[in-house]
Amino acid sequence: MDSQGVYEGMPQRDAFGSGKQSQDQTEAQNNKRSRCLEPITLCLGIFCALLVAAIIVMYIHFTAERDMMEMRYVNMKENSYETQQTYESLRRENQNLKTRVEHLSDARMKTISGTSRYFISCEFKNWIDSRQFCRDRGANLVIINTEEEQRYVSSMITDSIWIGLSDIENEGVMQWVDNSSVDVEFWVSGEPNDASGVEDCVHIGHSSPPEQNWNDQRCTEKRRWICEN
């Protein structure tokens, strides 16, 4: 019985030994897996840290860019306001200068024989606009009725000026702006010649003698003018 008992107990010892070996192998495999997972876990941790760092950097960058854009917008608004203020200031200054020029021009009114006043323009306009300028001020382009007046007007000018004479209403028939006829004439030799059929308005030339300084010209030409009232 002892031999049999010994024989019968041996498989039990083999089974126990085999089970222990299997458990050791499992633990070894688990340890191996753990060692393999450690680098992966470390890499994932580093990746997450880098991702968080990148997000923070991008947030800081976009925040700074947003702040810069807001600052630029504010500066643009300020510059726009300053530009508008400068424009308004220049506009007011231009208006003031225009008013001063008009006042200086008014100061150039002159009298002859105590009956007429003459306004010599500083600007240049065509004949139609010159006539309208005078009318707006209760006057007319100058009407010359005597040799004395012709000499006086000629003495005041330094360049070519419009006078109130034309044949706009009736081609070939010169009339003053008050529809009166011409009593005395002081034409340049050969004038009026209505060159090309378009010369309907009269100006006085400063380079010719007073006795001969009228010339017909295109009404669209821009010249200075003299008003009379």
Image (cartoon, rainbow, N blue to C red):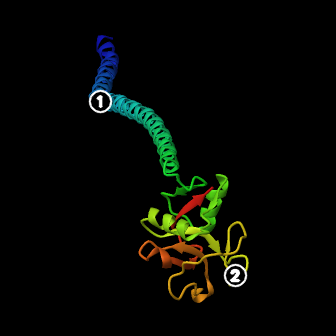
Foreground: 66 or 197?
197
Tell me the residue that label 2 is attached to.
173
Residue 121 location (% of width, % of height): 51, 58
Q: Left or right: where does residue 181 sit relative to residue 69?
A: right
Quadrant of image for the N terminus: top left
Amino acid under label 1? Ile
Residue at 68% over, 84% down: 172
Q: Secondary structure at mark 1?
A: helix
Disc 2, disc 1: CB below 8 Å? no
Foreground: 133 or 215?
215
Which mark is drawn over residue 46?
Answer: 1
Q: Secondary structure at mark 2?
A: loop
Q: CA distance from mark 2 to mark 1?
A: 104 Å
Residue 97 location (% of width, % of height): 47, 45
Residue 44 location (% of width, % of height): 33, 31
- Quarter of the image for residue 177 reads bottom right
Amino acid under label 2? Val
Q: Is residue 154 above or below residue 197?
A: above
Q: Left or right: where does residue 175 sit relative to residue 89?
A: right
